[in-house]
Image (cartoon, helix red, strand yellow):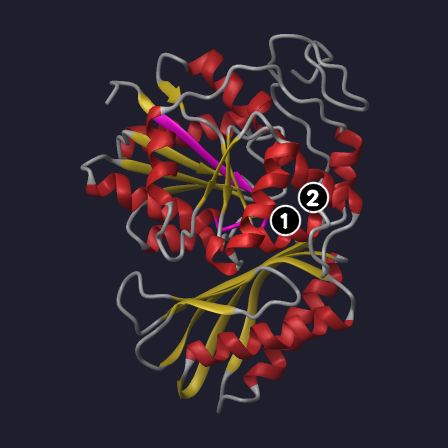
Amino acid sequence: MSTKARYIMIGGFLGAGKTTTVGRLAKHLSDQGLRVGLITNDQAGGLVDTKLLRGQGYATEEIAGGCFCCRFNTLVDAASKLANEAKPDVFIAEPVGSCTDLVATVTYPLRRMYGDAFTVAPLSVLVDPIRARRVFGLDQGGTFSAKVAYIFKKQLEEADIIVISKSDLIEDAQREELRAVLAQEFPLAKIVTASPRQETGLDELFAGLMTGEQARRNPMAVDYEVYADGEALLGWLNATVTLKADDEFDANAFLKQLAKIVQARLQRDGAEIAHFKMTFSPDDGIAGELASINLVRSDYVAELGMELDEPTTGGQLIVNLRAEADPASLMEAVKDGLAEASLNFFGLKATLDHEEHFRPGKPTPTHRDGEVVMETKGGCQPGSGCC
């Protein structure tokens, strides 16, 4: 292992399986005796991802208020804090699922300014195969509008490694058909398949992330007007809720009911869910004990990731919901869901402690590096004042 710390960034669209993969990689490296520091990222604070990763015992810093590209200095500060406190051998960063252009705005500047402190791993981008098959027209089903799909495809375009995540969800023939499309569309990327949840196919990915180097090539062209419009079509909701009951209740069952009610409300409104995830931390549980649930498409079934073994009388619920929808409608769906689900549990009261619902603002990178000036319609060009 080099004396320099290793910087690994695992990207991908909302719901692609990034947090599960980060957790698996962190455990894999920890089992080898390496110290790991994690950095999560979101447009707002109060992340389910941060709660889940800290619950697994990893030193984790959260960067809120914008993508890594727009919070580059905060990213460096977070890495410095982890370096001082946890002294990681490896930093693993999970960017916002609606963010792209990470090579030019994050890893190239990091390598240029802090190359004496970090070696930079190849950029891996995870892709949900069902979502990808719909975006590329291989299957019918709920998908995003063209400007949101633009971000989805741009994430794949800049990848060194494209990971067909959740590969267990589709048949072999469907997987090979998707692989062929990805190879044709993005010939510079290595394509691997894996199932982070089932812990299969990860060895090849992890080996590449620890031994490979990020490709040195000109940054891709990005139309920042389309990029900004695509992000602005996405509604964002983060909320913290206190649950308190007169008697013990099954928190696992509550999460499933709440997810089902909110999903039905959004389906009725024609909203396409990008990612809906929640964690519940019981007040009477042991440290780190959690229940979690995850929904990655409007027409999918919400799945419990972690479950509580015992009923509880209350605790803290964290809700993260991202969908192509008006943010106010997301808030109303969650409020209605809390009210309706609570009625099914004796004496249960849900108190909304904090919430943020909004559309992401236009991305304005702190830096944008490249070997040559790339003409980008409406984009952030080297030397244009934003770099």
Mark 1, secondary structure of its residue = helix
Q: Within 10 angstroms of label 2, few (less than 14), some, or many (20 or more) residues?
A: many
Mark 2 → mark 1, Cα distance in angstroms: 23 Å
Read off the magenta span: 6-17
Q: Say whether residue 331 is left or right of residue 375.
A: left
Residue in view at x 55 percent, y 73 percent:
351
Image coordinates for residue 339, horizontal then vertical, percent: 62, 80
Residue 132 — which label? 1
The answer to whether one can see residue 382 in this image is yes
| Quadrant housing the N terminus | top left
Between tags 2 and 1, which lies in front? 1
Which residue position is annotated with label 2? 360
Q: Could you tell me the amino acid type at mark 2?
A: Pro
The residue at the far left in this view is: 33
Q: Is residue 225 left or right of residue 72?
A: right
**Mark number displayed over residue 235:** none
Tell me the quarter of the image containing the C terminus. Answer: top right
**51 vs 347: above or below:** above
Left or right, 153 with respect to 224, comes to left
| Whether residue 100 is visible | no
